[in-house]
């Protein structure tokens, strides 16, 4: 019995030794190359404006083999629904045209054996061009592009952001010519004009809708486009001044050139609103005001003023430098607010402030103040007036002045310097943020109406454009001691305006 157990132990030991003996079979072994995406310290979540901002990712791919043999794939999807194959290159640099929402962006690298490395990123697409302060500027090449500024001072709950080059990013190129006017006209369209052309744009993403010629419904655009200004009319339609001619819109298309009488006219680049009329303008050729009748191309003259009036709307006799609705006589839409205007002598240095009530052409002269001796008024290029108080501002290339208008005494306060451009910078545009209701002081921005002033400057030597934001006193026009914000923009600013979402 012991002999049998001994033999069993020996057999077991031999089997164990055989199992541990090194296999000397004829095999070839290879190390498998590493293939994965290293995510340490990399950004995995992106927030972009629809069709505007680019998602740029160059994944840190770890691979020990021949990288030229790898294939790459980028896909965008929600849940299991793949929407777009965005790229077949390792690095991606694309805009996201999909509607606002949260998406998964997946990167896939595949080697020659079919092994895969996967990495997923979160992409949040937000509305492409939300509300903000539109800034139209001249580029280094002499064309026009647009930035949009968003800040918590005038848009509640947002981060301080400058959306760059929103026009050229969407449309593939800048607009020919220097900027003349940018205006949010309706919830559907924004209008952008240069000294050479103009376009109607989608509010959602600044995408092209119509060119200058297509905007004229009856096919009668000016032979050589020369836009000078664009303003809303009394019925929320647009009013265009081109080479001294006035054109009005219906359903966002130009339907006619305004005619007056046999004398003809040459419009100053301003349009003002008036209750029950299409709007009004100043005829520089005959130095008179003209009112456009409701929903028609025909304009009319105002009745002559009484002999006691300090000026006659039919015979001002001066050159208009500025006119805009302002403070006073606007308790309801049935009564227009006063219009504040600045004139100069046709020859000579005289400067005059007229506050006008167009609803009473027999006695339109709310105020008529000789402001010839106001500091630097001869060099004033830009003007602004408050909706909510008797405050006005004017600007030269270097300074902004503020003053108050007293219509009862027919005087103004002594203008005070409110802003001095830093060395090397010149002022190129100035705008108050104003409520956009046609006749009243409310509208889109009732809480911020006339309370913020935007001043654009240009440093020619540095090639740098800036926009300064100041808090403004609605009654005096006095500005804060320091700017609330200063932004650098893409070029020399020609016009600025507020845009709703």
Image (cartoon, rainbow, N blue to C red):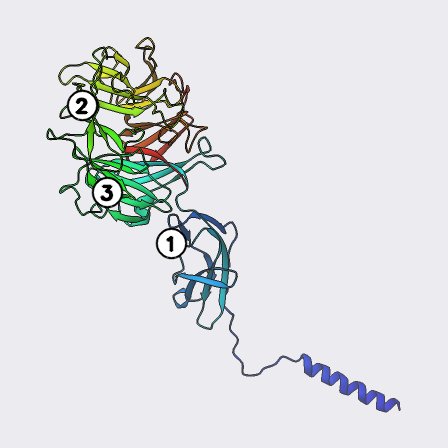
| Most foreground residue, 349 or 470 | 349
Disc on the earlier residue, 3 or 2: 3
| Most foreground residue, 73 or 268 | 268
Crowd tier of the residue under label 1, counting other residues whose Cα lies within 10 Å: few below 14, some 14–19, many 20 or above: some
- 370, above or below 328, in the image: above
Relative side of 412 to 43, left or right? left
Disc on the earlier residue, 2 or 1: 1
- 42, above or below 446, in the image: below
Crowd tier of the residue under label 2, counting other residues whose Cα lies within 10 Å: few below 14, some 14–19, many 20 or above: many
Give the spatial CA distance, label 3 vs label 1. Answer: 37 Å
Per the image, the residue denoted by label 2 is 288
Per the image, the residue denoted by label 3 is 254
Q: Quadrant of the N terminus?
A: bottom right
Q: Is residue 422 visible?
A: no
Crowd tier of the residue under label 3, counting other residues whose Cα lies within 10 Å: few below 14, some 14–19, many 20 or above: many
Give the spatial CA distance, label 3 vs label 2. Answer: 24 Å
Q: Quadrant of the C terminus?
A: top left
Image spot of residue 390 (x, y percent): 36, 17
Res 277 → quadrant: top left
Image spot of residue 104 (x, y percent): 49, 57
- 89, above or below 175, in the image: below
| Most foreground residue, 112 or 349 | 349
Per the image, the residue denoted by label 1 is 94
């Amino acid at each position: 019995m012991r002999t049998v157990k001994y033999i069993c132990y020996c057999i077991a030991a031999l089997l164990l030794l055989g199992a541990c003996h090194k296999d000397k079979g004829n095999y070839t072994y290879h190390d498998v190359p590493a293939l994965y995406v290293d995510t340490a310290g990399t950004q995995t979540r992106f927030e972009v404006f629809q069709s505007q901002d680019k998602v740029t990712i160059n994944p840190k791919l770890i691979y020990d083999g021949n990288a030229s043999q790898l294939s790459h794939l980028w896909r965008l999807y929600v849940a299991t629904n793949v929407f777009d194959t965005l790229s077949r290159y390792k690095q991606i640099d694309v805009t996201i045209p999909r509607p606002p929402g949260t998406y998964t962006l997946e990167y896939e690298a595949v080697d020659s054996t079919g092994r895969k490395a996967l990495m997923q990123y979160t992409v949040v697409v937000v509305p492409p061009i939300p509300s903000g302060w539109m800034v139209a500027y001249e580029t280094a090449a002499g064309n026009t592009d647009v930035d949009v500024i968003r800040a918590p001072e005038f848009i509640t709950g947002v981060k301080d952001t400058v959306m760059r080059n929103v026009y050229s990013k969407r449309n593939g190129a800048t607009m020919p010519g220097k900027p003349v006017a940018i205006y949010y006209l309706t919830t559907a369209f924004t209008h952008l004009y240069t000294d050479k052309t103009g376009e109607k744009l989608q509010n959602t993403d600044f995408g092209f809708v119509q060119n200058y010629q297509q905007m004229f419904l009856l096919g009668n655009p000016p032979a050589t486009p020369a836009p000078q200004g664009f303003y809303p009319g009394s019925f929320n339609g647009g009013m265009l001044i081109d080479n001294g001619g006035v054109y009005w819109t219906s359903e966002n298309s130009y339907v006619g050139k305004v005619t007056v009488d046999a004398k003809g006219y040459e419009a100053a680049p301003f349009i003002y609103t008036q209750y029950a009329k299409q709007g009004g303008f100043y005829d520089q050729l005959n130095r008179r005001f003209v009112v456009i009748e409701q929903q028609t191309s025909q304009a009319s003259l105002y009745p002559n003023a009484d002999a006691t009036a300090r000026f006659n709307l039919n015979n001002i006799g001066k050159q208009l430098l500025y006119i805009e609705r302002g403070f006073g006589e606007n308790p309801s839409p049935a009564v227009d607010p006063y219009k504040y205007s600045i004139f100069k002598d046709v020859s000579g240095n005289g400067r005059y402030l007229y506050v006008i009530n167009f609803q009473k052409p027999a006695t339109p002269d709310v105020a008529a103040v000789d402001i010839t001796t106001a500091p630097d008024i001869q060099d004033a290029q830009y003007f602004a007036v408050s909706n909510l108080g008797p405050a006005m501002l004017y600007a030269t290339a270097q300074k902004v002045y503020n003053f108050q208008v007293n219509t009862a005494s027919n005087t103004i306060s002594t203008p005070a310097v409110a802003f001095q451009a830093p060395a090397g910078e010149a002022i190129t545009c100035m705008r108050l943020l104003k409520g956009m209701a046609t006749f009243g002081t409310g509208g889109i921005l009732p809480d911020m109406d006339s309370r913020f002033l935007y001043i654009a400057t240009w440093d020619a030597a540095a090639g740098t454009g800036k926009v300064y934001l100041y808090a403004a006193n609605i009654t005096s026009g006095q500005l804060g001691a320091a700017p609330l914000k200063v932004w650098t923009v893409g070029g020399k600013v020609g016009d600025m305006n507020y845009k709703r979402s």
